[in-house]
Image: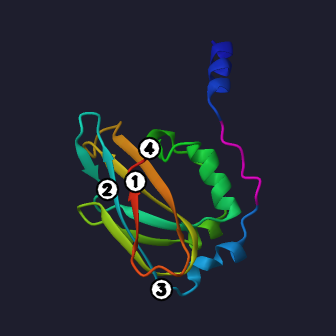
């Protein structure tokens, strides 16, 4: 029995620590004033075509630093969706969370960030559905990357659907 437990434990992929150190200087772009506007819509489409909006969810604007890129690559791999039950419970540098911006989605899954400085960013949120008292709910985390050059005259739109 103990051997079976050890074998099963070895099958679970453990996330490796991030090799890049967090650079507060690199992430400080999030605090710089800018004129950019990012607008978006966060949703998932269920298997039968029903659209589920990310209603009232926190959306994060994360500077695409070397640390963040490595973390997103490790956590998401080649996808832009991660089922909520697979999201790793790992320690990250506390400054990583501090040097982000957040907003909330409206009931229709729409959100916006204004006064964004030029740079590359990850935009991420959750789309979860099912009864709140259910042990296993559906959905997960979606993200995309957006780059602002500082020359935009219109808002930059991002769709967070996991595709």
- Find the distance from the CA under tag 3 to the CA under tag 2: 26 Å
Q: Which mark is residue 54?
A: 2
Query: Which one is in front in this view, the residue at disc 3 or the one at disc 4?
Result: 3
Q: Are marks 2 and 1 in contact (CB under 8 Å)?
A: yes
Q: CA distance from mark 3 to mark 4?
A: 34 Å
Q: Which residue is mark 3?
A: 35
Tag 1's secondary structure? strand
Give above or below for 40 relative to 150. Answer: above
User: From the viewer's perspective, is 120 left or right of 135?
Assistant: right
Residue at image point 48% right, 43% down? 82
Of the image marks 1 and 4, the number of the one nearer the N terminus: 4
**Residue 67 appears left or right of 158:** right
Earlier-in-chain disc, 4 versus 2 = 2
Q: Is residue 105 magenta?
A: no
According to the picture, the residue beneath numbered tag 1 turns out to be 126
Residue holding disc 4: 84
Q: Are the residues tagged 1 and 4 within 8 Å (C-beta)? A: yes
């Amino acid at each position: 029995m103990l051997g079976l437990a050890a074998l099963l434990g070895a099958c679970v992929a453990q996330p490796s620590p991030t090799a890049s150190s967090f650079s507060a200087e690199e992430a400080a772009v999030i605090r710089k004033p800018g004129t950019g506007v990012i607008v978006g819509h966060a949703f998932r489409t269920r298997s039968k075509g029903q659209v589920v909006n990310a209603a009232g969810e926190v959306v994060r604007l994360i500077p695409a630093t070397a640390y963040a890129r490595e973390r997103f690559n490790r956590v998401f791999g080649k996808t832009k969706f991660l089922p909520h039950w697979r999201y790793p419970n790992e320690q990250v540098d506390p400054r990583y969370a501090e040097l982000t911006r957040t907003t909330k989605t409206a009931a229709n899954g729409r959100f916006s960030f204004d006064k964004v400085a030029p740079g590359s960013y990850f935009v991420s949120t959750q789309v979860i559905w099912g009864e709140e008292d259910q042990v296993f709910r559906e959905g997960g985390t979606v993200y995309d990357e957006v780059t602002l050059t500082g020359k935009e005259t219109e808002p930059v739109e991002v769709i967070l659907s996991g595709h």
